[in-house]
């Protein structure tokens, strides 16, 4: 169903790691560590600036993979992994995009399940990958059938 999208990418989208957004995100996830929002703590840290929480890339805009349409409900969030080359610095610009890595199906007691693997990338302005975030989206047979109609 989605095998034809393997290898397709979205266009890169510029994202800025804004101080206010980082502070609100840290509050929302219940992490009060001052490394995320207090400028003095950031300056005194080994990074010499504030950083974003590890799951902050969830809020970035990764663009659209042309033609890939997923339903707005009924999907199962199977797994998500983050890999960092270094922390995300408050105030920096990143260019983010998504790539369909794989799609496969497995038979289960619920019928045939589809597994869509999408990796999100964040690069600095020089094109160096700073982080990746890989998600497994599970598509049930009922959802797949509804998409075909």
Image (tube, grey):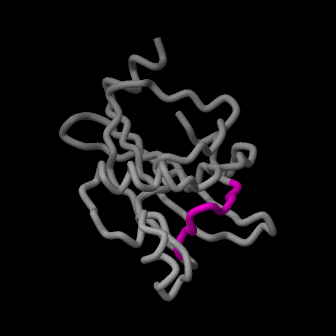
Rendered position, 3 above or below 55 = above
Tell me which segment is drawn in magenta.
87-95
Q: Position of residue 27 (x, y in %)?
A: 30, 53
Q: Quadrant of residue 55?
A: bottom left
| 52 over 109 or under it: above or below | below
Assess whether residue 5 is covered by the magenta stretch: no
**Residue drawn at x 41%, y 51% as measured from the top left:** 136
Q: Position of residue 2 (x, y in %)?
A: 55, 37
Residue 93 counted in the magenta span: yes
List x then y, in percent, for residue 110.
21, 35
Secondary structure that dominates the magenta span: loop
Residue 23, placed above or below residue 39: above
In terms of depth relative to the viewer, which is nearer, 76 or 145?
76
Furthest residue in direction right, as rendered: 126
Q: Nearer the viewer, residue 124 or 62?
A: 124
Measuring from the top left, give residue 89's x and y in whole percent: 57, 69
Residue at 46% from the left image edge and 84% from the top image edge:
45
Residue at x 78% of width, y 64% of height: 125
Instruction: Give the residue at x 70% y 55%.
Output: 95
Q: Residue furthest left?
A: 109
């Amino acid at each position: 169903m989605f095998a034809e999208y393997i290898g397709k990418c979205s266009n890169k989208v510029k994202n800025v790691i804004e101080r206010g957004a980082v502070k609100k995100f840290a509050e929302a996830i219940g992490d009060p560590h001052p490394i995320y929002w207090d400028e003095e703590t950031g300056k005194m840290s080994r990074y010499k600036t504030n950083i974003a929480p590890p799951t902050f890339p969830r809020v970035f805009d990764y663009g659209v993979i042309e033609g890939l349409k997923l339903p707005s409900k009924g999907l199962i969030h199977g797994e998500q992994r983050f890999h960092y080359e270094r922390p995300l610095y408050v105030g920096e610009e990143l260019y983010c995009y998504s790539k369909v890595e794989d799609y496969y199906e497995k038979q289960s007691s619920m019928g045939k399940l589809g597994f869509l693997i999408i990796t999100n990338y964040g690069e600095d302005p020089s094109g160096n990958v700073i982080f990746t975030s890989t998600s497994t989206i599970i598509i049930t047979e009922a959802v797949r059938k509804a998409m075909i109609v």
